[in-house]
Image (tube, rainbow, N blue to C red):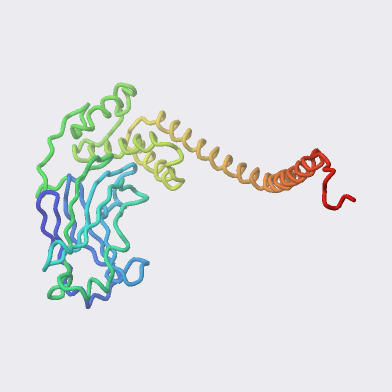
């Protein structure tokens, strides 16, 4: 059972020695208005004889495009007899679609975990995690039980969170008819559609190099989803087409660079050989310039 106090999470892994599964996961907890889950590999995550431990974004596969979370966190395998012997590791990372989990594959060796007193007590391993959420981009999870309900603000009939107001206002200022044909009336549904739209705009603002082809396919699918409900998004389609063209250009340039690199290899070898030959000739030239001595031993 997990216990949470502000930014601190305690997880007791029971019957640790007899666990058969390769991975065990904690319950979902809310810190910084975001949902997190701990993942442990009792027999190691591609690291023999080690206990691996990670902090991950819960249900990350269901979050809208463009989400990112910047967090500083520490993971501790607690020595329940002597706290100063506990194994503490810290790091700071951006969690996103590509990297929804961060942690340590070599958190502690299994030899130390099993043999040193205090880590495995009554068959249980105690994990303590501290999380400090520094920045959130995209969707924020708010639990009524773990966090206070955030007050929303009405912007052109859409209920949005305070930090979304500026972005939504900019959308309506630049594209006044963006929601003129939007049909849904349910306020919760309208908020969900707006969150998808904001995620789309945030993703497009990233460098094309950071957007994968799979992301592009999902972006187009989301655009069809929004336009089917009445959003006027021709301008966003054009932006997405620009990103797609840049991705094509990126692929073409990478292929051309690889081809040029292959063509350059024999030239580099030839250049290296010619430099070596020049060095040899220079050495011979230097020797040829050296005056002849009248007192060499072999001169009679």
Front residue of 116/276: it is: 276
Residue 124: x %, y % from top left: 15, 71
Q: Position of residue 68 (x, y in %)?
A: 30, 43
| 173 shown above or below 96 | above
Left/right placement of residue 298 relative to residue 129 reads right
Residue situated in front as seen by the camera: 150 or 274: 274
**What residue is shown at x 55% (from left), y 43% (from top)?**
251
* Residue 283 on image: x %, y %: 75, 44
Residue shown at the point (22%, 53%) measured from the top left: 74
Quarter of the image holding residue 205?
top left
Residue nearest the viewer, comparing 178 with 33? 33
On the picture, is 138 further left or further right than 10? right
Q: Is residue 219 above or below residue 171?
A: below
Which residue is nearer to you in this view: 270 or 61?
270
User: What residue occupies the far bottom of the structure in this picture?
Assistant: 18
Residue 123 sits in which quadrant? bottom left
Lateral position of residue 171 relative to residue 15, left or right = right
Q: Tell me where residue 149 appears, x and y as whole percent.
A: 11, 41
């Amino acid at each position: 059972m997990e216990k949470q106090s502000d930014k601190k999470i305690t997880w007791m892994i029971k019957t640790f020695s007899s666990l058969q599964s390769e991975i065990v996961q904690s319950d979902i907890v809310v810190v910084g208005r975001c949902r997190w889950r701990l993942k442990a590999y009792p027999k190691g995550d591609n690291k023999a004889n080690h206990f691996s431990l990670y902090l991950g974004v819960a249900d990350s596969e269901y979050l809208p495009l463009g989400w990112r979370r910047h967090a500083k966190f520490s993971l501790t395998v607690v020595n329940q007899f002597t706290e100063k012997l506990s194994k503490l590791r810290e790091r700071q990372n951006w969690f996103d679609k590509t990297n929804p989990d961060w942690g340590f594959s070599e958190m502690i060796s299994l030899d130390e975990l099993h043999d040193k007193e205090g880590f495995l007590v009554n068959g249980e391993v105690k994990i303590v995690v501290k999380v400090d959420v520094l920045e959130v981009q995209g969707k924020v999870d708010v639990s009524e039980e773990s966090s206070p309900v955030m007050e929303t603000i009405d912007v052109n009939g859409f209920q949005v969170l305070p930090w979304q107001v500026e972005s939504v206002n900019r959308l309506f200022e630049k594209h006044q008819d963006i929601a003129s044909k939007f049909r849904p009336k349910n306020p919760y549904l309208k908020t969900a559609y707006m969150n998808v739209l904001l995620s789309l705009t945030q993703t497009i603002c990233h460098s094309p190099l950071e957007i994968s082809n799979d992301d592009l396919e999902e972006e187009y699918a989301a655009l069809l989803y929004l336009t089917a409900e009445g959003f006027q998004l021709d301008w966003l389609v054009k932006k997405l087409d620009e990103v797609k063209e840049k991705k094509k250009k990126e692929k073409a340039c990478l292929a051309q660079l690889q081809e040029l690199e292959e063509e350059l290899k024999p030239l580099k070898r030839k250049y290296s050989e010619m430099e070596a030959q020049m060095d040899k000739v220079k050495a011979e030239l230097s020797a040829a310039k050296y005056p002849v001595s009248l007192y060499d031993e072999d001169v009679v």
